[in-house]
Image (tube, rainbow, N blue to C red):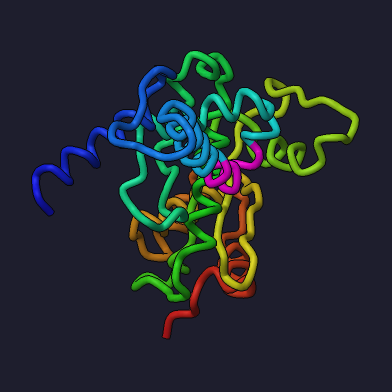
Amino acid sequence: MNDDALDWQKSFVNAVMSPEEGRVISGLSGSISAAVATAIYRNNILEGFNESLKNVYGAIFVLIGEDCFREIAYSYGRSIPSLSGDRNAYGEHMPAFLAHHPLTREIVYLPDMARLEWASHEAYSTAEYFLGHGLHASLRLVESSYPLMALWQLCQHPDAEGTLDLDALGGDSVLVVRPQENVLMRSLSPSEAAWYRALLEGHPPDQAAAAARTVEPDCDPMLYWETAVGDGVLQQQH
């Protein structure tokens, strides 16, 4: 690619992605003005970001509303453009972005909800195989000071009546995995979360059981093992 073509590509990106509405793509000709053509390009590209991110962050969309989400998506697209032709690879920085954006930084549980949704997105896209320690490759553990699963379930039925008391419900540890066709997400007890955390850190089953009993002395780690094997989350080691 020669320097002129590269310079034009850079100017195209700068014009289309600029928040300044007066910027236009240079060198355009045709029946419509450069300003209108630039606006069409800009809208198509930014709406592409919006739709792509909405497909991943459906709960965030419900929680903040269409207009706010579009503003966030446009801002995200301008700040963190896609580096891949695969839309499924786009959006991983949304949790940190929400934590610092002026429109959302006061909604303190949003970054954790975004982490949960990105974990689900990653789990869905992960290939079918088991890691060396027997856990399914798609397995994620998302931990938060907020009741993520209750919030997520509320977002699946936005027209349902009722409210959530975030302080009363407390924190959550959510298992995210796709052992079969669909992604499985469920809240874990503190001891089961400790058991999974230890396995994810590479500890052997006996140490994972000890970690669980440290949290809840009367828990049954064997039940966690049997449930994980039955759900296809853990491969029986021979």
Residue 44 percent across, percent down from the top left: 51, 41
Instruction: Determine the residue positioned at 48% across, 54% down.
Output: 140
Given residues 192 and 48, the one toward you in this image is 48
Q: Nearer the viewer, residue 80 or 101?
A: 80
Is residue 139 visible in the rendered structure shown here? yes
Q: Quadrant of residue 180?
A: bottom right
Q: Residue at x 43, y 76 (%)?
A: 129
Residue 18 magenta-highlighted: no
Q: Quadrant of the C terminus?
A: bottom left
Quarter of the image that includes the N terminus:
bottom left
Residue 186 appears at what percent x and percent y?
A: 66, 52
Q: Residue at x 43, y 32 (%)?
A: 38
Residue sitting at the far bottom: 238
Which residue sits furthest left?
A: 3
Question: In the image, which residues are magenta?
Answer: 51-59
Where residue 233 sits, quadrant-wise, is bottom right
Q: Judge whether 19 appears above or below 34 on screen.
A: above
Q: Residue furthest front?
A: 31
Q: In the picture shown, does residue 72 fall above or below 50?
A: above
Q: Is residue 58 magenta?
A: yes
Q: Is residue 210 left or right of residue 172?
A: left
28 with respect to 36 (left or right): left
In screen coordinates, is 150 left or right of 223? right
Question: Residue at the spot x=57%, y=70% of the render?
Answer: 179
Residue 118, image x, y percentages: 50, 46
User: Main SS type for the magenta part?
Assistant: helix
Foreground pick, 238 / 53:
53
